[in-house]
Amino acid sequence: MDLLKLNDGNEIPTMGYGLGTANYKSDGSSPPDKELVKTVVMAVNTGYHHLDGAEVYGNEAELGQAIKESGVPREKLYVTTKISGTKVQDTQEAFALSLKKLGLDYVDLYLIHAPFFAKTPEDLQAKWADMEAIQASGKAKTIGVSNFLKPDLEAVLKTAKVIPAINQIEYHPYLQHGDLVDFHKKHGIATAAYGPLTAAVKAKPGPLDATYEELAKKYGVTPGEIALRWVIDQGMVVLTTSSNEQRLKDYQKVSQFKLTPKEVEEISEIGKKKHFRGFWLDKFAADDKS
């Protein structure tokens, strides 16, 4: 996998395996899910060394077990976890618990999962100061945010000593977030995209179907790989998931071709004809494209 250099000098693999959505466990204290451990080991051994977890996925223990069982040296893996973005809690305690469940001494990336816990900009600023302290301790190499919109980032940047390295957002042609990505670029914040296959899978039928099919035929791949490549060709990190080994292998074909700038632009323009949001539907109005 290619690497993307972040604003703190660290590098992140441009494609990651996400443990949310299909791998989500509603009760994190329930007995370990052995099938999930097996699935993650399979993903690691298929070449996915960037593993994206979170406190709220309820499966940090399984991720930690899979890391052990994979046999891949810790330093060859890139491990992300996130503190809940909806409940008020002590950041240091939550982080310590995440490390314990993962069975790790450090994570490569620690994110605030969402800004929804905050009632005021000062709440966001205080939480970010906590994140900076965690990075200073060496137990998180890189820190960032997730699901933050422009006003949330502006609040953090007012008092930040360390600029967030990355903002992980739902991103696909049917949800391009207005000028948010340009704002990221202006401030040296990388973009990571989750839900990248939405327009090719979840939001069908749609205006992009024919374009995806045409490009898939041209490059000898599936529409899903076109959807992933569209993200990577914009200089972003892409997160995907599957429990199907062949599908995960197929996704890796994205490293074997590139879309032309014109094709990237065409997908972007056609994508603007439809709006679809797959996550956090309780937080946004149906027509909110931010």
Image (spheres, rainbow, N blue to C red):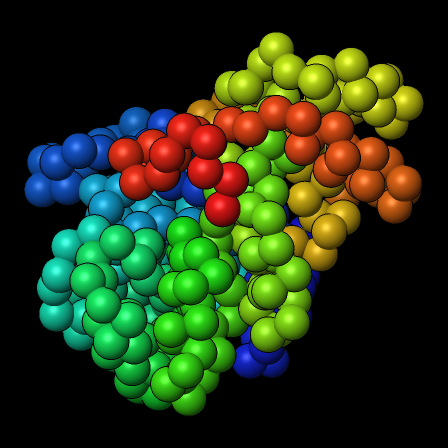
Closest to the observer: 173 or 3? 173
Indicate the quadrant where residue 108 lies. bottom left
Q: Is residue 138 left or right of residue 8?
A: left
Q: Residue furthest top?
A: 205
Q: Is residue 285 visible?
A: yes
Q: Is residue 24 left or right of residue 27?
A: right
At 30% from the left edge and 58% from the top edge, which residue is drawn?
Answer: 115
At 56% from the left edge and 46% from the top edge, which residue is drawn?
Answer: 177
Closest to the observer: 156 or 84? 156
Q: Is residue 236 above or below residue 279?
A: below
- Pinpoint residue 86: horizontal percent, then vertical percent: 21, 51
Looking at the image, how many numbered discs can be counted on the residues? 0
Q: Is residue 37 above or below residue 141?
A: above
At 44% from the left edge and 56% from the top edge, which residue is drawn?
Answer: 149
- Pinpoint residue 67: horizontal percent, then vertical percent: 37, 51
Indicate the quadrant where residue 235 lies. bottom right
Q: Is residue 256 visible?
A: no
Q: Is residue 271 left or right of residue 78?
A: right
- Pinpoint residue 85: horizontal percent, then vertical percent: 26, 55
Q: Is residue 161 above or below residue 241?
A: below
Q: Is residue 27 above or below residue 152?
A: above
Closest to the observer: 48 or 92? 92
Q: Is residue 114 left or right of residue 144?
A: left
- Pinpoint residue 3: horizontal percent, then vertical percent: 67, 61
